[in-house]
Image (cartoon, rainbow, N blue to C red):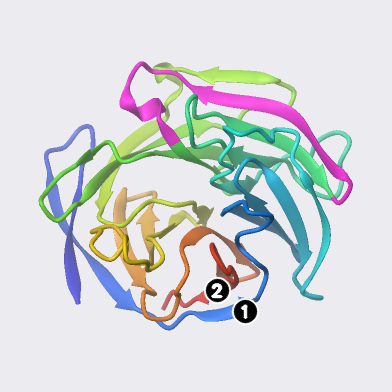
Amino acid sequence: MKSAIIIRCPLAAFILLSAAVLHAQATREYDFPGTYKKRSAQGMAIHKDTAFLLNDQGHCRIYDLKAKTMTAEYDLASAAPGNHANCASFGVEYPKDNAKYPALYISECKAPYRCFVESVDENGSRLIQTLQLKTSGFDEKIADWFVDPAQKCLYVITHASKVTDDKGTKSHIISKLPLPSLREENVTFGKKDILDQFEVTFTNLLQGGAIRGGFLYLPVGLHDTPKHMERKDRDRAVVVVDLKTKRIVKTVNVNASVPHEPEDADFYNDTLLMYCGQKGGLFKIPLD
């Protein structure tokens, strides 16, 4: 089936495009818990055979994906009540004290909407850089920061800026930023630093995301509870954004096979895994 998606670009009028909505059967590949020590599941990033699972306020669990076991856990250096740790993304540069893992980018998600860049391994973490966007506009209200490893840049997406229709469709601003060297401890981007910017709209509740091959993969939606059943943003899916054409090209609906709240996603080899809340699990998302 098809659904209409409205894309807003800064140099163009409204364009009505059609993006495929695919209903897919996701499979639970890993049983790692979502809610942990009474903290909700949030960000996830994968490097080789290792998954870093984050919980609200910045608690980190490290899992060996081959052995399916937890190898370490600790509070991140950026851990704080206001750090929602909503999204996690590995960068391309390795910290000077860490040859095992690239720097990890963690989205605060709450004001002042910063990104915490940390050196992480099984022994703990160290805060090495803090990023923030200040424009005096809504585009600085960032929900998620993502590293695009191919372009060696950053993309950020805002919380919903407005609701565009009676179906509850929300507008989100996506901005492209340069990826600073890890030698810079505190980086504040301004409007002049924005390399590109556009808007996308979708109904579902925004969660985390990951970039691969020029596409941004956004897990969205909510788990089913009596209070969520009437919400227009509850459908669980992965929204796929083409960063070159600046439009949504596909929505993979997994409502029937994923009972828990989507939180974040990343690729393990060529497989997209989605980290979920509540009883958790990493779910394999079919993209074809």
Taking the magenta stretch, the answer to whether it contains residue 136 is yes
Q: Is residue 189 found left or right of 14 in the rendered image?
A: right
Q: Are marks 1 and 2 in contact (CB under 8 Å)?
A: yes
Tell me the residue at 75%/34% (across/down): 77
Q: Does residue 9 lie above or below 243 as drawn?
A: above
Residue 213: x and y, percent? 51, 58
Residue 149 in sight from this viewpoint: no
**What is the quadrant of residue 185 in the picture?**
top right
Nearer to the camera, 188 or 75: 75
Q: Does residue 265 lie above or below 60 as drawn?
A: below
* Range shown magenta: 122-142
Give the labeled residue for mark 1: 29
Question: Dot 1: what SS?
Answer: strand
Q: Does residue 74 lie above or below 185 as drawn?
A: below
Residue 156: x and y, percent? 45, 38
Nearer to the camera, 37 or 151: 37
Give the labeled residue for mark 2: 283
Q: Does residue 189 lie above or below 98 as drawn?
A: above
Residue 209: x and y, percent? 49, 53
Disc 1 crowd rating (10 Å Cα; few below 14, some 14-19, many 20+) is some
Residue 20: x and y, percent? 26, 70
